[in-house]
Amino acid sequence: MLRGMKLLAVLGLALILLGCGDGPQAKRDKFYDKGAAFYEQGDYVKATLEIKNAIQTDPKFAQGYYLLGMCSFKQNDYKKAYGYFNKALELNDALTAAEVMVGRLLLMGGEHEQALARADKLLTASPEHAEAQLLRGASLAALGKEKEAVFVLEKLKAAGSQEADLYIMLANLSLKNDDSVKAQAYLEELLGVDPGHRAGRLLLASVLERQNKLDEAQIQLQELIGQQEPEHQAEARLLLVRFYLRHQRQVEAEALLRSLSAENPKEERFRVLLVRFLADQGHEEKSLEILRQGLNDLPESLVLTEMMAKYRLGRQQVDEARQLLGAYLERMKTGPLFLQAKLMLAQIAVQEQEFDTALKLADEILGENGNDLGARILKGDLLMQRRDFDGAIVEYRSVLKELPQNVPVMFSLAKAHLGNDEPKLALELLQNAFERDSKLAPVGILLSRLYQQEGKFAQALGVVEKALQQNPENDELLEMTASLLVRRGRSADALELCRRYLAQDAENPRYNVLLAQVQVAMRDFPPARTALLRVLSRDPDNRAALFTLVRLELLQGSPQEALNHGLELREKDPENQIYGLLLANLYEQTGSFAKAAVIYEEVLEKNPRSLVAANNLAYYFAEYQPEVQNIARAQKLLEPYLENNRSEPVLMDTAAWVYFRAGDYEKALALLGGVEEKIKEVPEALYHLGMIQKALGHREAAIVSLEKALAGEPFSAGNEARVVLEALRR
């Protein structure tokens, strides 16, 4: 018995040793094989876990890194895939499959030259490498070298390659050359090799449709439907619906959508499509019938609930929309859909200008889910509306931490920093946002304005020119581009730009006014006047034309005519502060200072933060009504702006003159001290400086300032300045 037990122990030890004899490589391969099997099944998450186990066993396993890269690639995580493929090549530079994938990723990332270099490197070592030839052809095509690309790809095809990508590329290159017949031939050849190739059949249907071979295109789409498993046919049938819609076959489209809805009663998307289709066709009652039935059958569908709520809102039935969403909240109680419905309620509150209610709802959503980015964006917007810029910055930054590429949120954050008087941070954000997406016109407009504030007009012009290319219909970008071209001394280019737009729409009033503005800037007054009067003959209320006409009259030395047009503008829009300030300025130029002061009072009543109105009214008091109470009022008007505008010469000159009138000569001199360099060629400011210096007993300095003032352009107090200067010289 004892001998038997010893024998069993020896056998057990032998079995253990035998198991260990497989070694780390066998363990690695076991993990790898499981991962490869999961990869083939399309389960990339499980595949990744198994392959990572294999790499943990053997950290120098190049093939493992390659397959990890493929898993990341299939999950569209291209950055991670790129890292894994390069790691595989670092461990084994002969792993050509990894080299090809690096090339493909470079190509996808727009690095076409680098992708071509990778392909050429592979082909130097192995001239017949099919995947490298395919990569080379794709790289050449991306670089615009279509003929070379076709040559490479045709050669690969002649060598017997039946890669689907080869046929697809050749077909696309043919389409680029408007050769639909050749593209069709390539795709038919592909489907002869691989009848189940979905992308190839879809492209063939598109090519046939392009040739107006609609029956044949429909056959291809129906063939595609038939090739799908029953549970996957719905997607292919939707392609047929879109085909019907493109060719105004609404009856067939509706029938197919109704079939899809009936066959898939638990899926909301088919009902949504049917509702939208019927609404687009003008069948409101039919659309509502489907929507009501959908809400009855699928009471937890947020999409259908939101559609009905939007329908109610579109008909000003705000209470009904709120009741609908409130009932949905009662049913759902909690969860992501519950929070989305509450967010819509908050958005309705914003539309109704119930900002406190909206903020309360946003806070409730964030109380349940602090990561609800929609609620954070809404809260940021609401805090911006309250001028709580610090709070808005916190919300927008929280969103960008999760969505660092979100350009609209970057734009909102930039505006919050501007509100917080942090222009450098705003500029940095806008530069980043514009680099990522120059199509968003407001980003380009604000970035250009910041550049202009910094005096960087070349950069400002570059931004709006690029933005205008992306948004050719945006009038504001067009006007900014023309204005900056003029400012940069490129008036001829500005004229050409205007004429190019007018060639497309000769009667467009904005284009005609813009052309006139450029002509006014060039002092070419007769055609500008003709264009403006023509616009006003068709639209007497065109304020841009009137505004430009005011400027034209001023430049031509006709202030009274300018004043008449300014009065017209104010009459058409009495609430417009810009027109009010313009009219006040025109009154000043025609000597009606008291009338100008009345307008400044009106502007300040509506907008107490108007620096222009505050400055000009204060100057009026100091110059024309320097009574004690008026000077005290002038000081009160200016005081909020002095600390943060020490380098602003116009404001400092006004403030200095006010304090001079108040008898505070030391403060008056100190205010002008910070802008002395900026006023050295401004006669009126030099006159004020001389008068302040005289009051302080600085006789020699006062003489110098007054002499400089009188040596410049004539100014209203010139005679008084001469009298004072003569007295000082005696």
Image (tube, rainbow, N blue to C red):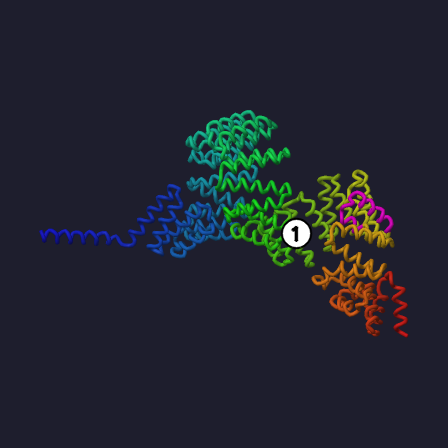
Where are the magenta residues, as a range?
558-582
Q: Does the magenta segment cover residue 561?
A: yes
Q: Quadrant of residue 705?
A: bottom right
Number of numbered discs on residues: 1
Residue in front for this viewpoint, 712 or 345 = 345
x, y percent for residue 498: 73, 45
Q: Does the magenta segment cover residue 574?
A: yes
Secondary structure beneath label 1: helix
Q: Is residue 476 left or right of residue 312?
A: right
Q: Amino acid at mark 1?
A: Leu
* 615 is higher (above) or lower (below) than 728: above
Q: Is residue 174 left or right of residue 636?
A: left
Q: What secondary structure prevails in the magenta region?
A: helix
Residue 86 in view in this figure: yes
Residue 128 in view in this figure: no
According to the picture, the residue beneath numbered tag 1 turns out to be 446
Residue in front for this viewpoint, 177 or 243 = 243
The C terminus is located in which quarter?
bottom right
Q: Residue at point 51% right, 45% down? A: 149
x, y percent for residue 683: 83, 64
Q: Residue at point 40% right, 42% down? A: 42
x, y percent for residue 30: 30, 49
x, y percent for residue 160: 42, 40
Label 1 packing within 10 angstroms: few (<14), some (14-19), many (20+): many
